[in-house]
Amino acid sequence: QKIEDLALLRSTVERLASSLPVTDMHTHLYAPEFGELLLWGIDELLTYHYLISESFRWSEEDYSHFWSMSKREQADWIWKKLFIDHSPVSEAATGFITILQSLGLDVTSRNLDDYRRELEKRTANEQVDDVMKLAGVDKIVMTNDPFDPIERPVWLSGGGKTDPRFYAALRVDALLNDWPNAVKELQNLGYEVQAEWTERTKAETRRFLSEWIVRMDALYLAVSMPGDFRYPAEDHRSKMIDEVMVPVCQERNIPFALMIGVRRRVNPSLKLAGDMSMLSDVSAVEALCRRYPDQKFLITMLARENQHELTVLARKFRNLMIFGCWWFLHIESMVEEMTKFRVELLGTSMIPQHSDCRVFEQLIYKWGHSRRIIGNVLADKYEKLHLSGWRLTEEEIKRDIDDLFNRNFWRFLGKA
Ligand code: RAT
Ligand code: ZN
């Protein structure tokens, strides 16, 4: 039934955008069976690396002092700097307040110990269930690294796949960006590789990827790249992509996800919080898409300056799916800007957001904020259509939002 009333049109979009289930296609979250890798609770939330770098803007102390503190002390320190001594208006800080409110904690009390006590009453399993319900996220794609000594034993003992809400993505950064180290890791795992690029090394690296894709049931292969990634080039990365990664992805019929434009550790003292964004070369993606028309590429870039060009490129290659507003772009102003021109250039044929959450409750604010913005952008576009006499049904609106939040990802994988 067509919606005739403009106000009803907008409220329908808002309702559906705030409630339809989401597939979060890139996170750093883990299923409960991964034990300590699943981060949740007040102290983890406050020591999120986005908040660590913001806190140091208000401090003259040695970095080492911060790192020597316990997690709880670090959380207290960040709370004081970003929430008490100053107002929490940044995206990550506001997000923490959104979480408190959604969990039913008393935001006005500003009593961190009360919040801690409340959450400590819960188990990890309960928190995962409740948060997924609150955020409306029903499928979560993890980031899975066989070289991680805590994560690897879970997979090797046959675990990792019991919770059907969680999916794996095989992360391959070291193979592309730190080959000497990857060689050591592969050798430790029993693969016969050498630093030299021999046929044997290629075959063994392919075997490693294939075996882990199968073991994890990985939905895609994933890597983050610096902005100076060039393709094609006479370098290790191009050889690894052409001779190992693309062949394995094709054989297993999975996409290759590249997240491009990060300069790691520009300030090493900040550790995980010390990475910078960097302009990237969109023509590398263009070359990949052209050379491998049957290979699917999931692409996101970190620099705002690359977004328009990347979106235009997606008009040229159907094997390119752009996704998410990554990291420093996951702020309200950028999500709005990017979602608008993506819709204007691609309609609904893209994946507007992923959360990149590291701490479980972050799903609440990252999706809460994004749902509202994406809903508003869509409502504006529908309103234009409405004023031109085009009438939408609730079913059509549902279909469009479901494509954006959920189905575009699964369809791209060939699994919808
Ligand atoms: O967004 C983040 O938390 C970053 O630290 C990175 O993990 C980034 O998302 C990545 O996947 O490399
Ligand atoms: Zn990430």
Image (cartoon, rainbow, N blue to C red):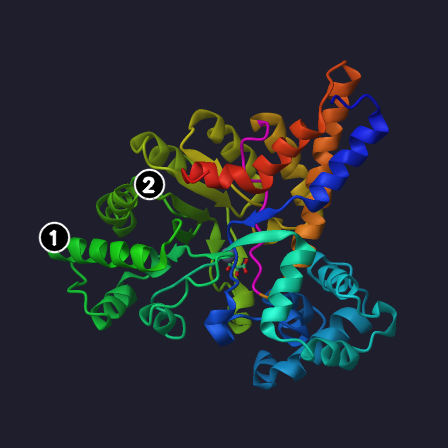
| Residue 52 x/y as whole percent | 63, 70
Where is residue 46, by image quadrant?
Answer: bottom right
Instruction: Give me the residue at 57% from left, 86% from top.
Output: 68
As shown in the figure, which amino acid type bears the numbered disc 1? Glu
Q: Quick one: label 2 or label 1, which is nearer the N terminus?
A: 1
Q: Magenta: predominant secondary structure element? A: loop
The secondary structure type at the circle numbered 1 is: helix
Residue projecting furthest to the top: 389
Q: Is residue 196 visible?
A: yes
The Cα atoms of the two marked residues, 2 and 1, are separated by: 22 Å
* Residue bearing the label numbered 2: 231
Q: Nearer the viewer, mark 2 or mark 1?
A: 1
Q: Position of residue 372 (x, y in %)?
A: 73, 44
Q: Is residue 112 above or below residue 407?
A: below
Q: Closer to the camera, 41 or 121?
A: 121
Q: Amino acid at mark 2?
A: Tyr
Nearer to me, 224 or 281: 224
User: Does residue 306 show up?
Assistant: no
Q: Which residue matches tag 1?
A: 199
Q: Position of residue 215 (x, y in %)?
A: 31, 60
- When the figure is inspected, residue 261 is found, relative to residue 96, above or below; the finding is above
Which residue is found at the position 72% from the left and 45% from the top? 18
